[in-house]
Image: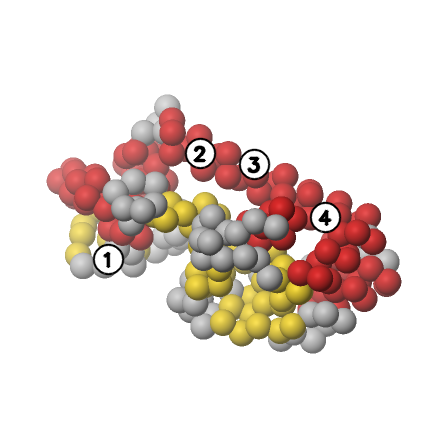
């Protein structure tokens, strides 16, 4: 899985050989089972992590236990939260948890710092990725702050279903996705069930009127 890992990252693979060597000679393969905490608030960043396969969910957890999903890191991507902490020498303010088994490459901080200092191409990649992900995070903020909750919930119900109509998710899972409390999600889902748009059971949601949910998701 990790042989020739840098080829999975097209931008990194295009760096000059001497710049790639800084990364490849320090690379440490990682295999993480699902449910592993990759980083947590208050912990110092020690490695620049590049995901080869699997998904890491990055989320913010409030003192009262409420969660909001900020973004996910999948194969061929790196985590800007980690990049920011490495650049600023600050501790994490969010947590990263593997949603599936993850294969990744860890680049120790010393090698990351060396690449940032010596490779203009690597610096450009880091800051380009950072700017793109910040745009995604601003979209999350805008969605949570300004979009109606029922619309956001409909969008998240439709997104993972694909061709099927059964979603395996708890109220807490959905609350973290849309940035609200579990109890609020429970009330919203109850209303959707009352309308006949979904059917609820423990840990399972069946979409019974996809057309109406789609109309709600697209509402102005």
Closer to the N terminus: mark 1 or mark 3? 3
> Which picture quadrant has residue 47?
bottom right
> Which picture quadrant has residue 29?
bottom right
- Disc 2 crowd rating (10 Å Cα; few below 14, some 14-19, many 20+) is some
Picture disc at residue 122: none
Closer to the N terminus: mark 3 or mark 2? 3
Closer to the N terminus: mark 4 or mark 3? 4
Residue 59 lies left or right of residue 111; in this view the side is: left
Residue beneath disc 3: 135
Residue 32 lies left or right of residue 174; in this view the side is: right
* Nearer-the-camera pick, 68 or 82: 82
Closer to the N terminus: mark 4 or mark 1? 4
Residue beneath disc 2: 141
Helix, strand or loop at label 3? It is helix
How far is the residue under mark 4 from the one under mark 1? 40 Å
How far is the residue under mark 2 from the one under mark 4? 24 Å
Picture disc at residue 125: 4
- Which residue does the image show at 53% across and 39% down from the upper left? 136
- Which residue does the image show at 40% across and 66% down from the upper left? 35
* Nearer-the-camera pick, 63 or 27: 63
- Which residue does the image show at 76% across and 52% down from the upper left? 116
Q: What is the image's colouring?
A: secondary structure
Closer to the N terminus: mark 2 or mark 4? 4
Indicate the quadrant containing the C terminus: top left, top right, bottom left or bottom right. Answer: top left
């Amino acid at each position: 899985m990790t042989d020739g890992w840098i080829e999975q990252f097209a931008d990194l693979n295009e760096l000059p050989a001497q710049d790639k060597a800084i990364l490849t000679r320090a690379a440490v393969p990682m295999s993480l089972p699902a449910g592993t905490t990759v980083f947590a608030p208050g912990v110092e960043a020690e490695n620049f992590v590049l995901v080869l396969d699997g998904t890491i969910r990055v989320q913010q957890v409030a003192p009262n236990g409420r969660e909001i999903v900020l973004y996910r890191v999948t194969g061929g991507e790196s985590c800007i939260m980690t990049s920011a902490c490495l650049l600023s020498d600050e501790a994490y303010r969010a947590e990263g948890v593997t949603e599936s088994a993850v294969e990744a490459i860890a680049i120790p901080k010393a090698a990351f710092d060396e690449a940032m200092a010596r490779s203009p191409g690597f610096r450009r990649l880091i800051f380009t990725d950072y700017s793109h992900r910040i745009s995604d995070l601003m979209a999350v903020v805008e969605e949570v702050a300004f979009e109606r909750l029922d619309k956001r919930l409909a969008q998240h119900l439709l997104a993972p279903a694909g061709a099927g109509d059964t979603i395996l998710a708890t109220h807490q899972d959905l609350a973290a996705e849309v940035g609200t409390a579990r109890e609020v999600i429970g009330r919203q889902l109850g209303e959707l069930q009352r309308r006949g748009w979904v059917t609820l059971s423990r840990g399972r949601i069946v979409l019974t009127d996809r057309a109406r949910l789609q109309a709600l998701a697209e509402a102005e």
